[in-house]
Image (tube, coloured by chain):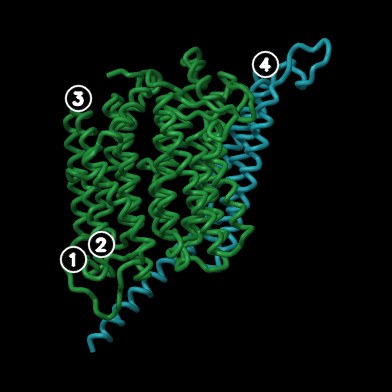
Chain colours: A green, B cyan
Amino acid sequence: MSLVDHLPVLVVIIPLMAGPLCVLVERPLAAWGLALAAAWLSFAAAVALAAQVNGTGVISYELGGWAPPWGIEYRIDTLGSYVLLIVTGIAALVMVAAKESVASEVPEAKVARFYAALMLAFAGLVGIVATGDAFNVFVFLEISSLASYALISMGRDRRALTSAFDYLVMGTIGATFILIGIGFLYMMTGTLNMQDLAARLPEVWDTRTVRAGFAFLTVGIGLKLAMFPLHLWLPNAYTYAPSVVTAFLAATATKVAVYVLLRFMLDIFGIDFALGRMPFEYILLPVGVIGILSASLVAIYQVEVKRLLAYSSIAQIGYMLLGIGLASTTGVTGAILHLFNHALMKGALFLALAAIAYRLRSTSLQDLTGLGRRMPWTMFAIVIGGLSLIGVPATVGFVSKWYLVLAALEQGLWPVALLILLGSLLAVVYVWKLVEAAYLTEPRDDVAVQEAPLSMLIPLWVLVIANVYFGVNTEVSVGLARQAAAVLTGGAG
Amino acid sequence: MNFLPGIFNYLVVVFLMMAGFYVVIAQGNLIKKLVGLGLFQASVFILYITMGNLAGGRAPIVVEGVTAYSSPLPHVLILTAIVVGVATTAVGLALAVRIHEAYDSVEEDQIHAEDIAADEALMNAETTGREDGRR
């Protein structure tokens, strides 16, 4: 076997190995170099995998040469390769910006261990997407979660510690719920392989055990992806974590959780069970809509920009849940597209905040005054990211909201379409607050502020340009999302 | 009462799970929360091990005359889950130690009160700072 055949596992192994190595090399610069190399190698592997999946279809990799369903299978399909691209791409870009930002926010003695934890969190997220084994999902989820608790606790504010602890408690409950759910499925089918599960579940659909498993999985994954009433850990965790960690987690962790939801509900249980036999859409639609509106409203009243964007993240997750809840190919396409687009937007916005935090040591709204003149490139990136968040045409945010509105109208649910638009209007309000502070107020002259260093501006602007590029040239992203959605929904409607 | 022996383990699981979950929610002490979390996780271990058992089944070693074996797979899975549980507790306790260093307390109420006090102190400092600037 050549190296190319091992790509599905290499994409996970590279960051997993880089983690301990970072601890061993100890020196901050060397650890950063290692992490950077690992992230880019992993990204290259993901690109190669995506090309391969596009050319030859689903890739199945037998770990250790044991044939599935007995052995563990790594399975990359269109959806998987799409999410892999997002996660590794964001990680690669964030790593470039990490050097300066981490050096200014994390004590030097801890920098190497910081990168080690970041690599482990990254490896866990990639592993969740690559694996085709239900129990593996739990293990990788815990690898990435434990690493992210440690990462969040490294924030400068002491409240980072308590928010990491809260996240640990809620995250562990979520993960344990997922474990219980997987246990119930195993009880009824005797298998852990996802494809095998999907094939065997219809025989035992009408048992209470499977229904209980479904419920446990829904709540567990809901906790992980900050589904509306289960989102309480997210605002604090994002606010007090080091800026780079916020940018990385906001753009990847919740996206991977949405992927897990799609994988379990639509692929393993199947759309007939999730939406036909269980009232999944009656849960997801209201939860999505309430999430969008309430989180957007709360976002408007925030004075700390990081927290504002964290609440906006919860709202954006609402859009994805709504798309899944609409249960049509268009709706799921919209959800997958929004997953991709939101990673681009929030990646850009939180990286811009990292740049601001690097110069100002603060990200509160009142310190943003007049920054449009002091840090023009950074602030302009925030404006474009904000426009994308609102969903202005020619940005990615427009494309995914277009599909969501379309899906809602397809089913005659025009109130839902209206609520999506209302959510956008609320986004206008909180994005306007940023613009107003940055451009329409006089700069404070007591502090000298320069533009952020190039190593942070370049990844930031790559993401900003991606926001515009994929907003205009929708062929690739929409094509892939539609293909993945068609597979998930069985090509129906 | 014939069914009891068959579901006894599951009753234990449900009791432990709910007790652990209750402790996590009701206790304000961070260490007690972690104890509850450990209990909660332990209940799931028992759930998995129980489901691997087969009435009349033997250990999965090929011996002549034995046809029914208990499934060994849940045991293996739960070994992994136990490791995860230990790691979670370790990270949680480490965080509790750091929280104690930063706040001098592991009681949720007190930590919350200290945060609010710190916020207010900061706001006061800022307003006086601005007034000073005006003068």
Q: Which mark is residue A439?
A: 1
- Measure how far apart labels 3 and 2 are at the Cα level: 38 Å
Q: Which amino acid does label 1 sit on?
A: Tyr
Q: Is mark 3 on a helix, strand or loop?
A: helix
Chain identifier of the residue bearing label 2 in the image: A
Q: Which of marks 2 and 4 is in front?
A: 2
**Rendered location of residue A102, percent (x, y):** 46, 63
The residue identified by callout 4 is B2
Q: Earlier in the sequence, mark 3 or mark 2?
A: 2
Q: Which of marks 1 and 4 is in front?
A: 1
**In this rendering, position of residue B59 left or right of residue A140:** right
Please name the residue that numbered disc 3 is placed on: A410
Which quarter of the rendering shows the N terminus of chain A?
top right
- Using the image as rendered, state which of residue A90 and residue A397 is in the foreground: A90
Asked if residue A310 lies left or right of residue A409, the reply is right
Circle on res. A379 = 2
Mark found first going from the N terminus, 1 or 3 = 3
